[in-house]
Amino acid sequence: PAAVVRSSHPLPLPVPEWHAVMSLLTSTSLSWVPASRMCLDAAMRRRFSRPGLAWSQRARVLTAAAATALLVAIWAPPALGSGARSAPAVGQPRVEAPAAALAVPGSGTLLWARDPGGQRPMGSIAKVMTALLVLRAGHLSQVITVTRAAVAYGRRDGASNAGLIAGDKLTARQLLQAMLLPSGCDAAYLLATAYGPGRAAFIAKMNTLAGRLGMSATHFSWFDGMPYPTEHSTYSTPADLLILGQAAMARPLFRQIVAERSYVLPATRDHHAYHWQNTNALLRTYRGAIGIKTGDTNAAGDCLLFEARRGGIALIGVVLHARTFPAAFGAATALLNWGYQHT
């Protein structure tokens, strides 16, 4: 079932409270219609603007407002069964994925969403957090030697890798390109080891930063999104991934790297030559696309966190658990086209 959100004003709630409402609404089999969103927003703006409102009072308001929204939603057309396929409603984008969202970065305006609070694995989109931690720590000119362990890890369990060669000496900045463009798990292994220091410490830092960013429905159990220790132990939500994407895209170097379609690193006495292709095909197929990261595992399906800019207007979105990458790229294209028609 689709949960369609269309709003011209910022989200009215702090992140944790917004997630609570979204989880309640999207856990039902009802379609979420604009009228219910208006009802919910109006109630929240009135109630949560009152100073000194205690959490117990907030909880009661939250429940009442959500109930009001659900009563409105009951009059919407019945949602399709999970296995059904149908043309999108008139004026709505065709999104062949169970979870997706589109927003205006920096403003808090959520334009469209389906299951925005649902927790799902997201594969290598987790590397956006890996990169953000490295960029925050700095020291990007430090030299890191490619180890045999990193090379072996990058070839394990079908992981994507940058083809790194043991003994090569690369800077942290070069390893960011090796991780973000071809989605190199070998590069992520080296960065997490160096910046933890140690991979366990690095994973702990990922979760700490997620909490600070307000990503309250996200957990990282591994440093690159690989399905360890289980397929579902690293997870996030569309709403949280939009927060992560905006934080990463605020970094100029991150923006520069993820916008590159490919990168050639010539050979030197310290390392072999490398040619890395960006896995984000949207950069080659959608005018204005500027990033940011693909992801996939068996449990995550094919995922895409993306951003585009046209006519001075930026839109950021995410698609989770598409059946194929062409479906994920197609959903992103549909969302962006719809977004630019309605902004």
Image (cartoon, rainbow, N blue to C red):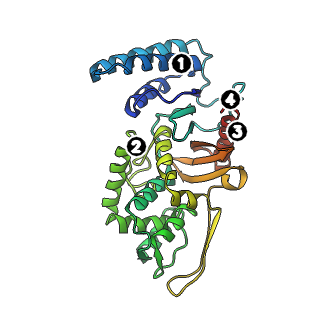
Q: Identify the amino acid type marked 3.
A: Asn
Q: Identify the amino acid type marked 2.
A: Thr
Q: Identify which residue, 1 or 318, lies in the foreground.
A: 318
Q: Identify which residue, 115 or 323, lies in the foreground.
A: 115
Badge 3 crowding class, 10 Å Cα cut-off, few under 14, some 14 to 19, many 20 or more, is few
Q: Which residue is mark 3?
A: 337
Q: Which residue is mark 2?
A: 218
Residue lying at 40% horizontally and 43% vertically, measured from the top left: 218
Inter-mark Cα distance, 2 to 3: 28 Å
Residue 208, percent from left and from top: 32, 49
Badge 2 crowding class, 10 Å Cα cut-off, few under 14, some 14 to 19, many 20 or more, is some
Residue 209, percent from left and from top: 36, 50
Residue 127 against residue 275 in the figure, above or below: above
Inter-mark Cα distance, 4 to 2: 28 Å
Mark 4, mark 3: which one is toward the viewer? 3
Inter-mark Cα distance, 4 to 1: 18 Å
Residue lying at 46% horizontally and 59% vertically, measured from the top left: 131
Residue 229, percent from left and from top: 38, 54
Badge 4 crowding class, 10 Å Cα cut-off, few under 14, some 14 to 19, many 20 or more, is some
Q: Quadrant of the N terminus?
A: top right
Q: Which mark is residue 38?
A: 1
Q: Earlier in the sequence, mark 4 or mark 2?
A: 4
Badge 1 crowding class, 10 Å Cα cut-off, few under 14, some 14 to 19, many 20 or more, is some
Mark 4, mark 1: which one is toward the viewer? 1
Query: Farthest residue in the bottom direction?
Result: 269
Residue lying at 56% horizontally and 61% vertically, measured from the top left: 257
Q: Earlier in the sequence, mark 4 or mark 1?
A: 1
Judged from the image, the secondary structure of the residue bearing numbered disc 1 is helix
* Labels in figure, total: 4
Judged from the image, the secondary structure of the residue bearing numbered disc 4 is loop
Q: Which residue is mark 4?
A: 92
